[in-house]
Amino acid sequence: MSDTPQPLSETPATSAPPPFAERFSDGLQSILQKMLGTQRQSPRRIKSFLNGTWLGHPLHPVLTDVPIAAWALTAVFDIIWLISHATWAASGAFVTLIVGLLAALAAAVTGLTDWSDTYGTERRIGLNHALFNVLALLLYLLSFVLRLLAGPGDTIAATILGLLGLVSVFYAGYLGGEMVFSKGTGVNHTAWEAGGEDYEVVMAAADVQEQTLYRVTVAGVPVVLLRQGERYSAISATCPHAGGPLDEGTLVGNTVECPWHGSRFCMSDGRVLTGPAVVNAPRYDVRVTNGQVALKRLEEH
């Protein structure tokens, strides 16, 4: 039986166009993917750099702390200025505001890079997250202009704009947390995979053909197995980035590419070579005994 949903009646129905937010997201993601070279051949260095593959950790959350902290300090200096009209407080607010603006631009670029690979509910939340961050950026930019025109002193209008910007960026941060902690965006999908204490037989060695990816199960965990000559290698079959099935990916030499978002992993050691994934795939030791292939997960150090 087909899994495709069937119409409830024979009367042809005209499907409603997708909401504006969905159309906007589709168009924006398409533009971002072209700019980032998402569809290009590996190694896609720019995208991998912005994802944080080289860091072993998503780059976006590392950068977001800077504008939030800087703009929070701006608010502190502004409050001090409102109370005392101290020139040093106005100067401090001006400097931290600039730091926040510069860091926010870097955070925006990396955030949009990560968002370009999302879909469904996480994509909608991510779009709102981005919009409130853009609103905060515009408010602080206008606040910056007003402070610049005011010279060494501060202005009430600039302070109010800054406080509104802080509220906006805090709410954007809340939405960012919603993506990570409720939807699992950017979470390592292999983090909770358990490894057995003993080797587990998965298949007969005679059935393992060369240069073919096999999906096997070890201690209840899906693993992808590869034979190249007399050498065997195995890593988790789940892509750490979004859970894509690596056993259905493309094998080039000793590298497997995830069919969902193009992350590439070395089959020998699980090392991530190309983003959007940022962590290595768990690897397994392979033994061939009495014509049987047995696997055991290797502990990470």
Image (cartoon, helix red, strand yellow):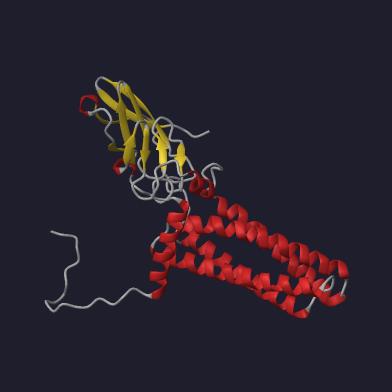
Which percent across, then down, holds residue 165?
A: 65, 72
At 43% from the left and 55% from the top, the residue drawn is 34
Could you tell whether 1 is left or right of 25 in the image?
Answer: left
Could you tell whether 274 is left or right of 65 in the image?
Answer: left
- Nearest the viewer among 77 and 38 is 38
In terms of image quadrants, where is residue 138?
bottom right
Considering only vertical position in the picture, is 82 above or below 200? below
In terms of image quadrants, where is residue 177?
bottom right
Q: For the N terminus, which image quadrant?
A: bottom left
Which percent across, then down, holds residue 184?
A: 45, 57
At 58% from the left and 55% from the top, the residue drawn is 61
Considering only vertical position in the picture, is 261 above or below 144? above
Which percent across, then down, holds residue 26?
A: 39, 65
Q: How many marks?
A: 0
Which percent across, then down, holds residue 112?
A: 51, 59
- Nearest the viewer among 98 and 297 is 98
Res 194 visible: no
Res 290 visible: yes
At 35% from the left and 50% from the top, the residue drawn is 260
- Nearest the viewer among 154 and 199 is 154
